[in-house]
Amino acid sequence: MEKDLGLNNIKKIWLAGIYYIPAVLLYVVNMFIPALRPGVIATVFMLCVAAELVIRRQLGFTAFIDRLVAAYFIYNALSVIWLLRSGMPFSVYAGEFVVSLLPVIFYYSGRSSRSQAFYMNFLIAVLITGILGIILQTAMPQFYIDYSYKIGFASKADAATCRVRMDSVVGSTVLGFLSVAGMLVSIPLIMSSNTEYTGTFPKASVFKSSGPLRLFGIASMFINMIVVFMCNQRSAMVVAILVIVYLNFLLFKAYDDRMRKRRAFLIEIAALAAGFILFSVIKQDAALKAYYRLVSLPGAIGQRSEQWVAAVNNMYSTWLGNGLGANGHRAIGIEDAFVVADGGIIKTYCEQGVFGFSMFIYILILTFKKGSRDIMKYCAEVGIIAAALLQSIGSNILSFQLSVPVFWFAIGRIHSQDMEEES
């Protein structure tokens, strides 16, 4: 008989599991129906996710980490008090709330659900945006050029300008992170033939054997990697390279047979070399562009550090912070606002202050501590969280409505076994 822990009868959380596919399709439809508001509809969808958690009694606070995440959410919600006192308009807070704070509910979805549907649907959604982006980038139809200019992806309404970065329908920054996360979610698929692996995608999946599962994982890894480099985002490209190193670490850790390791390594090197040569031949200008962007990374950090120092030195309150959204793009043009245009980590610190940022760091410490103990089981989750943080050094990854849910879901999944052990 199960103990009543508030999260006792663990059920599948259906709405959270399908979130990414309709969210992505909304952006696709938005190309043809400009009046559509994908962000507003996605916000309503997230509120429905929260409602489902409450109705199914899965919004529990039995473990310390649950209460810590709840305290973090409440603290940021209350920051509207000192944000308004500093002279900022409520619209700055409201806009940031729906894109960076409301998605915290996906922590409880990941914490509460035993369903594996979330990652498979996430991967399908990412592949839709990536493949669509490749098609649009190659064909560059006039309607897409007009759409890119109108929405702000390109500064000029011409094909050459639109090809500087691959935006697909969500923007190059978000697409870069989603594709990196797609690479990480592909890792468990690639490792599915390992009988000891019990992580994100178990044997009882949509595939009846590990063979098709591995092929799908390899294809997904390859496509997502191509998309990352076509996005031309420096942080995403660097993290994508680290993901390949991470994959090799996990493969060498998973397999005991030396010959199998050697064969897998040689196949991977051959595939990477073939992909690089193919990419360089077909898209030589894109390959050179990616190279120049990568070598410019150290200089970019040096340029942005001045902006970060200025933002920290002009905080409304060191302990409380400036309030949710005060250092984001929505504060541009507001008097006395110090916007952190590129640097999600510094932005988080400036908005949350010592108190809020300490809670955030403590959540991450507990998560990495638990995830690293069973890295083979939580390889995708640990990778997604680390990738988001690394990219947040120079990009505002944690301020996009499409990138934050998978970040918090991964944190919840790492802590989900606590309930299974307690129940």
Image: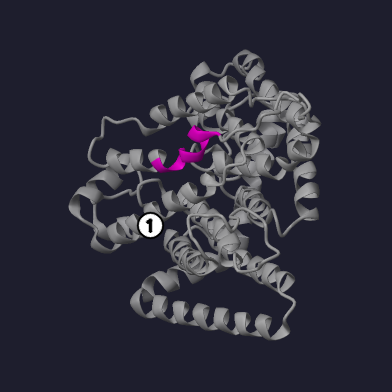
Q: Is residue 326 above or below residue 312?
A: above
**What span is in magenta?**
13-21
Q: Position of residue 286 (x, y in %)?
A: 39, 69
Please name whichever residue, 121 or 72, is drawn nearer the observer in this view of the structure: 121
Which residue appears at 55% of the width and 34% of the height? Answer: 13
Residue 404 in which image quadrant: top right
Q: Position of residue 106 (x, y in %)?
A: 59, 34
Q: In this image, 69 relative to 56: left or right?
A: right
From this viewpoint, which residue is outermost toward the left?
A: 142
Instruction: Please name the predominant secondary structure of the magenta segment in the image.
Output: helix
Image vertical order of residue 37 relative to residue 147, above or below: above
- Taking the view exactly as shown, the residue that stands out farthest to the front is 1
Residue 295 visible in the current orientation? yes
Q: Residue 12 falls in which quadrant of the image? A: top right
Is residue 414 found inside the magenta-colored segment of the image? no
- Is residue 318 among the parts visible in the rendering? no
Q: Quadrant of the N terminus?
A: top right
Q: Which residue is mark 1?
A: 166
Q: Position of residue 183 (x, y in %)?
A: 54, 60
| Residue 17 position (above or below residue 281) | above
